[in-house]
Amino acid sequence: MPKDESKTVLLHYSEIALKKGNRALFEKCLRDNIKRAFGDVDSVRVRIDYGRFVISLPEGVPDEMIVSRLKDVVGIANFGLAYNGDKDVDVLKAQILSKIEQQSFDTFRIMTKRSDKHYPLTSVEVNQIVGGHVHQALGKSVDLKNADLTCTIEIFNKRVLYYVSKHNGIGGLPVGSVGKVVSLLSSGIDSPVASYRMMTRGCRIIFVHFHSFPFTDKSSYHNSAELVKILTRFQYSARLYMVPLADMQQMIIENVPAKYRLLLYRRMMLRMAEIIAKKEKARALVTGESLGQVASQTLENISAISSAISIPVLRPLIGRDKESIIHEAKQIGTFETSIQPYEDSCGYMVPKNPETRARLTDLENAEQNLDGWQNLMRDILDRSDMLALRASFSPE
């Protein structure tokens, strides 16, 4: 009889299955990310077997750690900590009973997935034999729709594996499978959620934070670094550019009407982020903008600001309300850091009534008064810091 105690995980994806000719590329990316998620564990083996991933881990790895790490791997639909089962169904039903009777439940069901068509029993027959044995031994009722406990049996490639608890994953596409983007990260609630949203679409994020030190304190500098540390658990490592915006802001304050300050701040930020994107070979920028949430996020202002650059600006939260964004920030663990006090670079010397319906020609005319802003922008980027951050379990 095979040993039940081996550390094996059966893992399934969903969206990757829709990919046809290039599915192997997405599978490889997911496999690599799973290995990164266990970067501090030796002898982890990950292989693809009949449309599922089979992960083998050393005996000493705690189940709680396995579950917490895999729940943060983007691209996973669900997974279960599995046990080796015997091919003889009479032995298998005894093995399963020994595991199930340790659980607390009133109703149960057996679900068999049989990809190995050489196995002598159908999925329905295995369900009936194993389910009948459990019912007779424990007196528990079968419920095929809303069972308290589901035991899944998977028969494939001359193997039988089973698990009594299934964990849901994030879903989406594996981080890095689509390409790189640059995210403009503030210390607030929205932009970390926007960055996470793009990670679930397969993007690897390069972060850029604009700060106004010494005109403001360094709270946003430190908060943004902490936010990136939290988000690295989804992509394992990250680069964070800290860009000092203060000199550019001072030039704008001294030379353009007050109502345009915020919009010109934003245009300059996009331009500098675009330069960083080209350096990093990223194909787009990401912002946390939500339509109508603040003065700069009207349709007119968004259009006028975006015209400063040539690469796309992705806004995954554009149609989201604040309540739903806050809810997701709490789910991914960024909310508590985002609500810490900080001085926002875009809030520096902004009038009470900024322009909400800017015309592009007005902004372009205002920029004509900024003598030498291109040289100043290059100087600012030269003075920027770049921090390399890694998840705590990711090897150097």
Image (spheres, grey):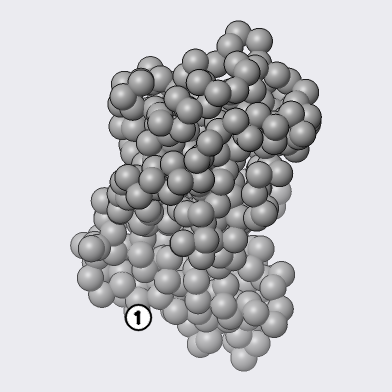
Q: Crowding at label 1, few (<14), some or many (≥20) Cα neighbours within 10 Å?
A: few
Q: Total number of numbered labels?
A: 1
* Residue for point 60% across, 85% down: 116
Q: Secondary structure beneath disc 1?
A: loop
Q: Amino acid at mark 1?
A: Met
Q: Position of residue 174 (x, y in %)?
A: 53, 63
Residue most extreme to the bottom? 118
**Residue under the point 57% across and 43% down:** 270
Question: In the rendering, at what x and y percent does residue 59 appear?
Answer: 24, 66
Which residue is at 44% across, 41% downward? 376
Where is mark 1, residue-wise? 1
**Which corner quadrant of the image does residue 41 belong to?**
bottom left
Is residue 356 shown left or right of residue 267?
right
55 vs 291: above or below: below
- For this rendering, which residue is in front, 52 or 5? 52
Residue 143 x, y percent position in the rendering: 67, 48
Is residue 235 rendered to the left or right of residue 323?
left
Residue at the top extreme of this rendering: 352
Up-down relation of residue 37 to residue 297 (above or below): below
Q: 27 or 270, which is in the foreground?
A: 270
Whether residue 319 is visible:
no
Q: Quadrant of the C terminus?
A: bottom left
Give the image location of residue 155, x and y in percent.
Answer: 55, 78
Residue 263 seen: yes
Identify whether 164 is placed above or below 355. Answer: below
- Indicate whether 172 appears above or below 85: above
Q: Residue at x 47, y 54 (%)?
A: 276
Q: Which corner quadrant holds the N terminus?
A: bottom left
